[in-house]
Image (cartoon, rainbow, N blue to C red):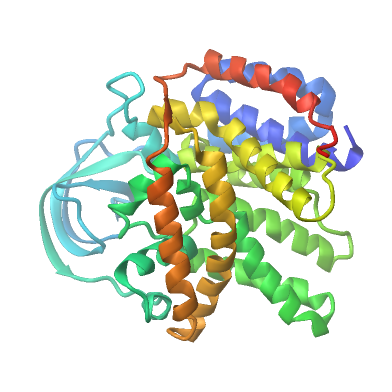
Amino acid sequence: MRPSWTWGVGLGAGALVAAWGLFAPWAFLGLGLLPFLRLPFALGFGLVLARALFFPLPEPPWGAAVEGVFAVRGGFTRAEGHLLWVSHYPPLPDGRYRLRGRIAPPQGRTNPGGFDQRAWLLSRGAKGVLRAESAEPLGPLPDWREGFRERLGAGLSLEAREVVEGLVLGDKGGLETAYPLFQRAGLAHLLALSGLHVGVLVGFAVLGLYPLGRWRYLLALALLPFYLLLAGPSPSLVRASLMAGLSLLGLFLGLGGAGVVQALGLALFLQLLLRPEALLGLGFQLSYLAVLGLALVLPALRLPPGPRGYLLGGVAASLAVQAFLLPLLLHRFGFAPLLAPLANLLALPLVALLVPLGFLKLFLGALPAPLVEPLARGLLLLAGLAAQGPLLRWGEIAPPGCALYYLGLAPLLLAVPCRLS
């Protein structure tokens, strides 16, 4: 292993083993990596384990009666000093409510492969449920982001606006009809804010501030917390922001940008140190696996120059991501779209145009709308067509099955350094 990889990979691997072992003790078998990664692995493992043991997520007072005025945002509220999921039918939209109910523990998985409410809540930093017996709406919550949302949707049809809000802000609230199409097409990850969005934002900033020299990297770094506040700290966006922030900081200090694998490991360590329970989140798992697939496959390929190389690179990237995500997608959703690599290859140029245009709309309003509208409709059309493709269906995959799959993938990864010509 190259020395430049050691600290990033070691800290990330140690943090992963520690966090995973808290929920599945057999994961501590990963301590066998210690002789290879030594101090970085031991430090990552020890710090994350100490964080989880000495500063655990506190349990709410089960059965406690709750009554008062609360702010509900994204289905969650804070009561008795704890973050709680508000259980109410129908689900409560964001706003202020007079709530009355009791705090109850979440439900675990009741059926094989079924929804595990406890793990889902833990991944979001919550351990309890507020079972609301009554909910009286009192008014909306103040939202400083509303002006940006209005400019983003200005001049667009309802369908296009929903797609652009999903792509730029990660808001899938209006995509009740379209989102299942994106899932069946294998394009749902496009609506999860990630490296593409952060790369466009940072790229604009670095190019626009070029006359400032290396200070432009520090100013671009300052944009990342703003975007996190604007779009919300989803796991994939936090991961991408950490990776970009580490590279920008390295460039500002004259150390050079962090390599993808090293930055990925450092971001994994920092996220798990902040909250080890985040490991249980599906978005967290998909984000890191997708980038890991790209990081292991793409640098090893020797592609021909020109359009052919670009096309082969796009196919390889799509296949690498799908290969690393396949068992998780089958386990969580029961199916995987077979046309996903082709659909992603066709969707990438549309998204590569829509994301920067969407950022411009946040500030320019309706001006770029004539360009955004046909692109958004084109992406919707592509999702609808690809959603009709064949699906690979599967049931629950146990951890040994996932381990065997990735062991079988290892020889293919070793054979990757080949020439595509």
The image quarter containing residue 29 is top right
**Camera sees residue 124:** no
Residue 30: give x, y in percent of width and height.
68, 20
Q: Quadrant of the C terminus?
A: top right
The residue at 52%/46% (across/down) is 343
Between 132 and 251, the one lying in front of the other is 251
Relative height, residue 4 to residue 392 (above, below): below
Q: Residue at x 32, y 56 (%)?
A: 175
- Answer left or right for 208 relative to 231: right
| Residue found 84% across the figure and 32% down from its top | 418
Classify residue 416 as left or right of residue 160: right
Residue 55: image location, x then y, percent: 52, 40
Return the x and y of residue 130 as percentages of the image width and height: 22, 45
How far from the left and from the top, in percent, is residue 292?
Answer: 67, 38
Q: Nearer the viewer, residue 353 or 194?
A: 353
Does residue 207 appear in this view?
Answer: yes
Residue 98 left/right relative to 176 = left
**Residue lying at 41% horizontally and 29% vertically, measured from the top left:** 335
Rendered position, 410 above or below 193 = above
